[in-house]
Amino acid sequence: MSEHQFDPKHADFLLSEERRTTLPPNEVLSHLEIQKNDKVADLGCGNGFFTIPIAKMTDEMVTAVDAQQGMLDLLQAYVEAEDIENVRYLLSSLGHIHQPDESVNKVMAAFVLHEVDDLGVALNEIKRIMKPGGKALLLEWKAKKTESGPPVDIRITEDELLDRVQQSGFQGKIVSINDEHYGVLAELDEE
């Protein structure tokens, strides 16, 4: 496990009511404008904080990607408990996502980009799996001291992430989430 990777023994917090209050999933996901026919990948899905609401928004298969089998196992248990049948589990790093080119039109990547070894490679992989006209919502921790979250020295600033997104060929804009988190909405041009 990478020194920056989330420890699965703390996974219960990810689905806590406290987290749902500060980071309301449906409100956050509204930035992606998910439709019933959208194919969505949730990168760094963890135990399903965003995966499960996404699966309820689309009739298509949702690809839940995580680098830790333990997190995928937890997600699968929650998905089965909710009687959801449109989630596919994929053990993969963001450095090489085991997903075909242009296979999804929406991507969610919540609080995982600060963990990758090479941000440029991860952004290029996100671009590779997205169809033209696709959208990605990239959530991260603001680069300031907070009660929870990763060490400040590994956080990505809003301006840095926006700049890197644009360097990777996306149109990008910062979206407000809350006092501790921000998002960058990254969009690909239609071909």
Image: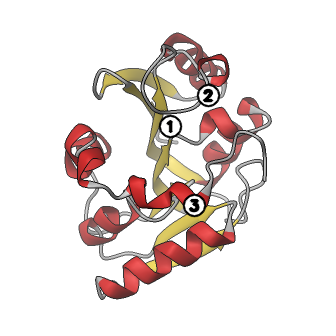
Instruction: Name which residue type carries label 3.
Output: Lys
- Cα separation, mark 1 vs mark 3, equals 36 Å
Q: Residue at x 42, y 27 (%)?
A: 147
Task: Determine which residue is flagged by label 3.
Answer: 9
Secondary structure of the residue carrying tag 3 is helix
Q: Residue at x 29, y 63 (%)?
A: 53
| Amino acid type at mark 1 | Leu
SS assignment at label 2: loop
Residue 164: x and y in percent read: 63, 21
| Residue 163, label in figure | none
Separation of residues labelled 2 and 3 (CA atoms): 37 Å
The reply to whether callout 1 and callout 2 are in contact (CB within 8 Å) is: yes
Please say whether residue 86 is visible from this viewpoint.
no
Residue at x 72%, y 63% (from the top left corner): 92
Q: In the image, what residue type sits under mark 2?
A: Gly
Across and down, in percent, residue 184 comes to: 44, 28
Q: Quadrant of residue 51?
A: bottom left
Which residue is disc 2 drawn over? 169
Q: Which residue is mark 1?
A: 188
- The residues bearing labels 1 and 2 have C-alpha atoms spaced at a distance of 7 Å
Mark 1 nearby-residue class (10 Å; few <14, some 14–19, many ≥20): some
In this view, the mark in front (2 or 3): 3
Q: Nearer the viewer, residue 164 or 72?
A: 72
